[in-house]
Image (spheres, rainbow, N blue to C red):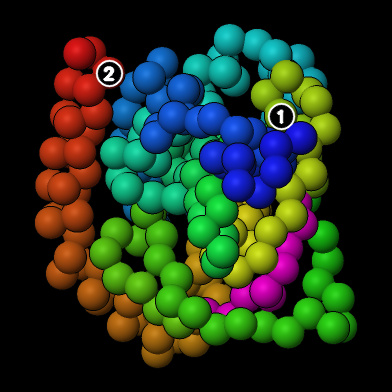
Amino acid sequence: MPDESQVAAVVQGRDVADFPELAPEAARGSVRRITVTGEDVLHRRNRDVPVEMLGGAELHRLIDDMFVTMYAAEGVGLAANQVGVDLRVFVYDCPDDEGVRHVGHVVNPVLDERGPEDALVVENEGCLSVPGPHAELGRVERATVRGVDRDGEPVVLSGSGYFARCLQHETDHTLGRLYIDRLSARERKRVLKKMNEMANDVFARRRERAAELEREFAG
């Protein structure tokens, strides 16, 4: 196992000594449209990925597309329902509070229950399906998610700080919850108003970034 000075990233929960700037899946993928709050697929529990899909081309292609779509939107996580697919999957490329980079995907994620000793930490949070604004939201400082990878192998991901927030946020997506659903009615209204003001600029930036990535992967 690499020592801390050699770790380039933690990929699928395992330390690796070398890893590219963008996950290799992205070069194989195609950018998809990101759904926006109000669309049905975002607001209901998504289907568990069936066993027969594990290891198959359809699931592999979805995960590839999700990675490049996440990068085009300059996000740190993306769930399948955010590209309009009714399946419980998410991808991530997210640092923790110590600057350690975590990269990977989870199929059928289950978040460990919060313990009585787990205090909430309030930080700014945003969402690619709520384009633009952020709001302060409490999440537990540490989180563990369990599931499988695209080939059905067990995955256990644990993290703290920003990465823990990402794990909680993305698992929420697969259950039909957005971060704005955890806000007060007044704060939610403020965020949605701000989203309407900012969305067009956000969409324009995403198109520019998608074109940059297409040129980079083609070149």
Horizontal placement of 156 versus 123: left or right?
Answer: right
Find numbered disc 1 in the image and state the secondary structure of the residue it sits on.
Answer: loop
Horizontal placement of 110 versus 213: left or right?
Answer: right
Horizontal placement of 83 versus 109: left or right?
Answer: left
Tell me which corner region of the image, top left, top right, bottom left or bottom right, holds residue 83.
top left
Residue designated by label 2: 217
Q: Is residue 180 visible?
A: yes
The residue located at (41%, 60%) in the rendering is: 127
Please report the bounds of the magenta region as a residue range: 137-145
Question: Where 67 falls versus 109 (above or below)?
Answer: above
The residue located at (60%, 69%) in the rendering is: 161
Residue designated by label 1: 149
- Amino acid type of disc 1? Asp
The C terminus is located in which quarter? Answer: top left
| Residue situated in front as seen by the camera: 93 or 177 | 93
Outermost residue toward the right? 116
Mark 1 near mark 2, Cβ–Cβ under 8 Å?
A: no
